[in-house]
Image (tube, rainbow, N blue to C red):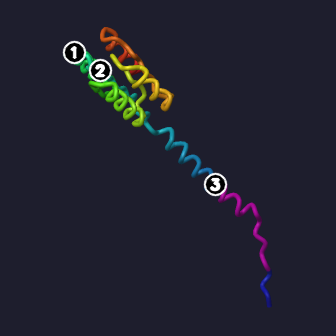
C-alpha cells in the first residue's frame, strides 16, 4: 500500500526562506553603516626646478603636519623637473588621493593630463604665501 501523500504548503517553505533573506539583508546594512570613513588624502607638491626654497619647503612640511594632526593623510613631494611633476601627480592620483595642493607646477604638463584622467581629483595651484591656507581648505 502506498502511504497517502501529504501536501506541503508553499507557505511553509516560503516563510523560512523570507526570514533568512531578511536576516542576510539586515546584516549587510548594519555592516555598511558601521564602517568608518577613510581620511581625506592630500598631496602637497612644491616645485624646486628654479632652485630649492628651503623656507617654502619648511612651510609645506608644517602645513602637512598640521593637516595630519587634524586627521588627514598627507604627503609632501618636492619636484625638480616638469616630468617629475607629472610622475608625482599621476602616481598619487592613481592612489586615489582627494586633493593636490601645488606650488609651481606646470599646468599643461603636470595638472591638465592628470585632471582629465582623474576628474574626481581636485587641484589647488597656489603661490607660497597661500600654501598653508590651501592645505587647510583641502583638509576639510
Crowding at label 3, few (<14), some or many (≥20) Cα neighbours within 10 Å?
few
Q: Quadrant of the C terminus?
A: top left
The residue carrying mark 1 is 53
What secondary structure is found at the residue carrying circle 1? Answer: loop
Q: Is residue 29 magenta?
A: no
Tag 2 or tag 3, which sits nearer the N-term? 3
Look at 50% across and 28% down and name the residue there.
116
For disc 1, the neighbor class at 10 Å (few under 14, some 14 to 19, many from 20) is: few
Can you identify the residue that label 2 sits on?
A: 46
Point out which mark residue 21 bears.
none
**Residue 38 located left or right of residue 3:** left
| Badge 3 element | helix
Residue 28 x %, y % = 54, 46
Q: Position of residue 32 (x, y in %)?
A: 51, 41
Q: Residue furthest bottom?
A: 1
Q: Quadrant of the N terminus?
A: bottom right
Q: CA distance from mark 2 to mark 1?
A: 9 Å
- Residue under label 3: 19
Specify start and end residues of the magenta stretch as a single range.
Answer: 5-19
Amino acid at each position: 500500500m502506498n502511504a497517502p501523500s501529504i501536501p506541503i504548503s508553499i507557505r511553509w517553505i516560503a516563510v523560512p526562506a523570507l526570514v533568512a533573506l531578511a536576516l542576510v539583508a539586515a546584516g549587510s546594512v548594519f555592516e555598511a553603516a558601521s564602517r568608518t570613513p577613510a581620511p581625506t588624502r592630500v598631496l602637497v607638491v612644491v616645485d624646486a626646478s628654479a632652485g630649492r626654497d628651503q623656507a617654502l619647503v619648511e612651510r609645506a612640511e608644517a602645513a602637512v603636519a598640521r593637516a595630519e594632526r587634524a586627521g588627514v593623510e598627507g604627503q609632501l613631494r618636492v619636484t625638480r623637473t616638469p616630468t617629475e611633476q607629472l610622475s608625482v601627480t599621476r602616481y598619487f592620483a592613481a592612489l586615489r588621493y582627494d586633493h593636490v595642493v601645488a606650488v609651481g607646477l606646470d599646468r599643461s604638463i603636470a595638472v591638465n593630463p592628470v585632471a582629465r584622467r582623474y576628474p574626481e581629483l581636485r587641484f589647488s595651484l597656489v603661490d607660497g604665501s597661500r600654501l598653508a591656507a590651501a592645505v587647510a581648505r583641502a583638509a576639510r
